[in-house]
Amino acid sequence: MQNMIILLLFLLAAYVQYRSLLKKREVRQVVVSISFMAVGVCLVLLREFHVKIPSPVSGINLLFHPVDLFMTRLLG
Amino acid sequence: MDTSKLTIRQMTMWFILYQLGSAFLVLPSNLASIAKQDAWISLCLVLAVQLLMILVYGGIAKQLNGASFDQHLQTLLGQWLGKLLLLLFTLMYPFLILSLVLRDLGDYITTVILPETPMEVIFVLMLGVVIYVLYCGVSTIGRAAELLFFIVMGLLALGYLPLIPSANFTNLLPVFEFGWKPIVHASFTNIAFPYIESVLFLYFVSQTNRPEKWRAVVIKSSLISGFLFMCVTLIVIAVLSQQVVTSLNFPSYFVVRTISYSEFFERFEIAVSVIWFIAIFFRMSLLMYVSAKGIAAVFQLKDYRSLLIPFGLITFVIAGILWPNTAILITTYRAWPFYSMFFGIIFPILIWLTGLFKQRVSQP
């Protein structure tokens, strides 16, 4: 529920901004912005429906934890 | 009025507040968990590495020649490769740090100050402020930095100077008890977080009227923030002893609670939270600005402002999913420096060398 309210707030703010941008005929800006907005909306909806989104941090840990272990052994 | 220019003074203050950012609260326990009572020596090492890296960053800044960092990447590597690199760099470095910082803030506020408030509310309030200030332009943030810098310094003095009488400096002895290895090991965290993030300051070279001063600004801000870290770490360890510091999540916050003068002058640890909140605000606004600016350059947008709201939304979700528990957070603190060094040390050195090579080729 919280997520949906927050999503609505963001969409409202985006709508106000796009309207003024379209008046200035800045189509490129609106298109790029809407593409990123779509990613954001998808992420919020996935989270709202409790789909597990992989965390970028787990990838970093997977790749760099061995480096840390190696350094710990080297400097331990 | 031009809202995209900063004065040297504004830039210095913004960078100092950026560097104080999230490291200020977690740094003493991170350093002390590895280097024990020698944590302050590792800070000296960190500053030495940072000054060396500033040579590289300064070299790149000189190569820019009035162009912005994103334009420079594109002229150096060609339009497509430059854009691809810029896209990857922006999404994997400043944008990811933005989510990490927001999550740090949420974790801190919900554990220490407002335990019953959902983290999402804190995220949205902070993002709202950051988006708004970036919408107003960089010079607004510069002026805010000028105002708030002295409040931060005043609160730091209020929080930490009264601790000096209760500091027991024998807690800092023996020096070099475990040799140099733990000192070097502990310095990794602080090098990555926040010092080599200075590569992001390269975006601001074209943002000032005197680009030749940029290197001096970064050196000055690193030394001042390094000095502040050093004072805080020394005081925290001297007052609490390293055994206690290691087991606390936020020692710089906890230590201020120990102040008590005749049951009157006490319990103002909230001052530390205020410092942190202000510093995080400047940190997030810089990261958000750099991310939006980078992506705007990739897609050839005239203005970065249209990207702020979508970025806010994505950051909001990513900050919520970063780590499910503290165990993963601790692993991340250990693994993060090596990831960060990839972008903060290897990437700028490659750019610098490519620039040098290109200069050499074009003027034989």
Image: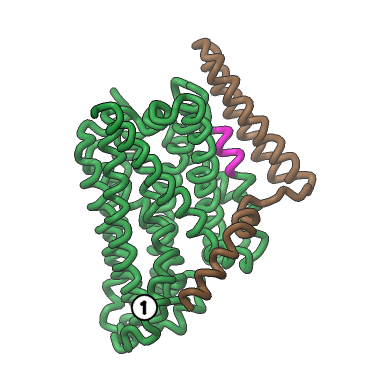
- Magenta region: B309-315
Examine the image and state in which quarter residue B195 appears. bottom left
Query: Which amino acid type is marked by label 1?
Result: Trp
Q: Nearer the viewer, residue B299 or B359?
A: B359
Residue bearing mark 1: B180
Residue shown at 24% from the left, 52% from the top: B219
Q: Does residue B110 show up?
A: no
Q: Residues within 10 Å of mark 1 (few under 14, many from 20)?
A: some
Image color mode? by chain
Residue shown at 55% from the left, 17% from the top: A28
Whole-percent x, y for residue B215 in the image: 24, 45
Whole-percent x, y for residue B162 in the image: 28, 75
Residue B207 as seen in the image, left or right of residue B250: left
Examine the image and state in which quarter residue B234 appears. bottom left
Chain A: colour as depicted = brown
Q: Nearer the viewer, residue A45 or B76?
A: B76
Residue shown at 29% from the left, 68% from the top: B44
Q: Dot 1 lies on which element?
A: loop
Residue shown at 45% from the left, 78% from the top: B245
